[in-house]
Amino acid sequence: MWDGHGPLSFIASIDCARLPAAALDVDLPATGTLLFFYFDGQLDDGDALVLGEDRESWAGARVLYAAADEDVAERGAPTELKPYPMAPLAARVEMTATEPWHPSMRAVFAPDAPLGNRYDHPVCSQEFLDALWEFNDEVGHQIGGHAHSVQNPVEIEIAEAVLDSEVSWDDPRLSQEADGWVLLVQFDSEDAADMMWGDAGALYWLIRPEDLAARRFERAMFTWQCS
């Protein structure tokens, strides 16, 4: 529930025991289920948005973890919500790549370059970018790896939210904070489940590695982007 707004929609669940854990770069539990919920605008025609810069809206996106030995029961969707159709998915291992203007890339190739912008290095050449986008040409659903941001790197959005948007993009604290987050999951718009996030956008949950290791999934941060 998001107090004052209503129930969150169930977006997805992940059966951790069925994942190729050794191939992941995030330390997920070996067993149990991760469940993702989001206030998707059904109840107010999209009037209330869940935004990183609005701390009051953070309750509109949640991650819950149910351990394998936890006593749980299946429940139906709240009557005021229309549940999304079920779309079973299987996982496969793939490589991911990040943008050259991601803070971690910039730190290697051009540490003094403006955050979020192209800089004078071959990795920012149009030829390289075309090859990169051909390799990684769609957002898709993903667990771990480098996020496929629709706009600017999602790590920067999360860092701005944590720092209350009180720092400029040339403040080193923003890059430092962005480096402290890893992608937990991203969920693309999905025709099979009647899911459309804005204009063919995606939902992202990120988490600090130390919180992931301690299974503090309630500390995961949410953002979304669309074209």
Image (cartoon, grey):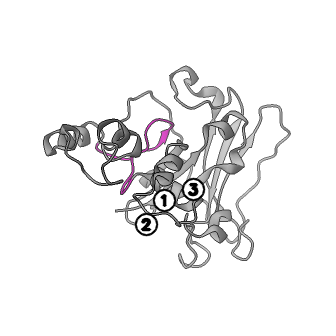
- The residue lying at 50 percent from left, 46 percent from top is 176
- Which sits in the foreground, 194 or 144? 144
Q: CA distance from mark 1 to mark 3?
A: 7 Å
Q: Residue 145: within the magenta? A: yes
Depth check, mark 2 against mark 1: the one in front is: 1
In the picture shown, does residue 155 fall above or below 104?
A: below
Q: Residues within 10 Å of mark 3 (few under 14, many from 20)?
A: many
Q: Which residue is mark 1?
A: 224
- Would you identify the image quadrant in which residue 30 lies? top right
- Which sits in the foreground, 103 or 65? 103
Q: Position of residue 211 (x, y in %)?
A: 68, 40
Q: Residues within 10 Å of mark 1 (few under 14, many from 20)?
A: many
Labels 2 & 1 near each other (Cβ < 8 A): yes
For the C terminus, give its image quadrant. bottom left
- The residue lying at 57 percent from left, 27 percent from top is 19
Name the residue furthest top: 22
Residue stretch in magenta: 137-152
Labels 1 & 3 near each other (Cβ < 8 A): yes
User: Is residue 189 rendered to the left or right of residue 126?
Assistant: right
Label 3: which secondary element: strand
- The amino acid pointed to by label 2 is Gly
Q: Which residue is mark 2?
A: 198
In the picture shown, does residue 94 fall above or below 197?
A: above
